[in-house]
Amino acid sequence: MGGALGTAPPARARSVANSPAREECWDGDWPPRLRAAVADAMTAAVGHARAARWPFGAVLVDPADGSVVLGAGNSAEGGDVTAHAEVNLLRKAVAAGVPLRPCVVVSTAEPCPMCAGALVWSEVRGVAYGTSIAYLVSRGFPQMRVPFGEIVARSTLPRPSLAHHIRTDLTDPLYRAVPG
């Protein structure tokens, strides 16, 4: 795993009916082809979210070739309240022997503080997400209002690169209503 990727289009603003357009933000080391791979991988993350009762999904991307290595959805309804998409993804990667450090996690929504801590501890190269915690709260989803960036900023561990508001045209529609 590892290696350079080529070029991709610049960040773009996306909008969804009933949500404001937000500019994609890429902080840290995101070569253009990795940005394109992350944007493409969001489709796979959305697929995992749609398969879950609570619509949250995450995928692991190999930056060497932009491929989606693994994916997972939220399965907390089974009684394990820690079974969020990102934690499930990390567990799946460890069980499969996939090295996490060179990889990027792409999540449909901003990781909650629990998932943020797990991602920082895993030392993944980067984390990209679509919908923000603020948007989730505005739609009635129960959340802890601690931004992912704040968890990263307070850590003494290596900081992952961060990208947010990625493909909100795909992710925001997942969160228009809290599942019944």
Image: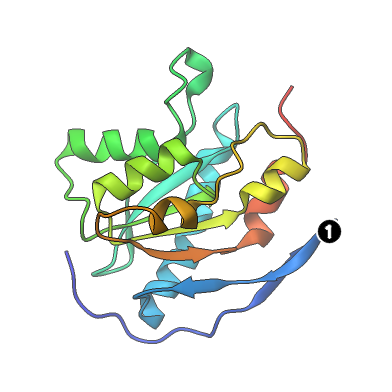
| Viewer-closest of 27 and 101 | 27
Amino acid type of the residue that numbered disc 1 sits on in the rendered structure: Ala
Residue displayed at 71% across by 41% down: 137
Q: Position of residue 28 (x, y in %)?
A: 38, 74
Q: Quadrant of the C terminus?
A: top right
Q: Residue tagged by mark 1?
A: 17
Circle 1 packing at 10 Å, graded few (<14), some (14-19), many (20+), is few
The residue at 28%/35% (across/down) is 92
Above or below residue 35? Residue 59 is above
SS at mark 1 in the image: loop
Query: Is 4 in front, or is 86?
Result: 86
Q: Furthest-top residue in view?
A: 79
Q: Position of residue 41 (x, y in %)?
A: 45, 59
Query: Relative to residue 150, is residue 94 drawn left or right?
Result: left
Viewer can see residue 70: no
Q: Position of residue 4 (x, y in %)?
A: 24, 80
Residue at 28%, 67% in the rendered image: 63
In the picture, the quarter occupied by the N terminus is bottom left
The furthest residue to the right: 18
How many labels were placed on the picture? Answer: 1
Residue 88, above or below 67? above
Q: Position of residue 29 (x, y in %)?
A: 34, 75
Coloring scheme of the render?
rainbow
| Residue 107 visible within the image | yes
For the residue pair 118 and 72, the one nearer the viewer reads as: 118
Say which residue appears at 55% left-offset and 30% top-offset.
52
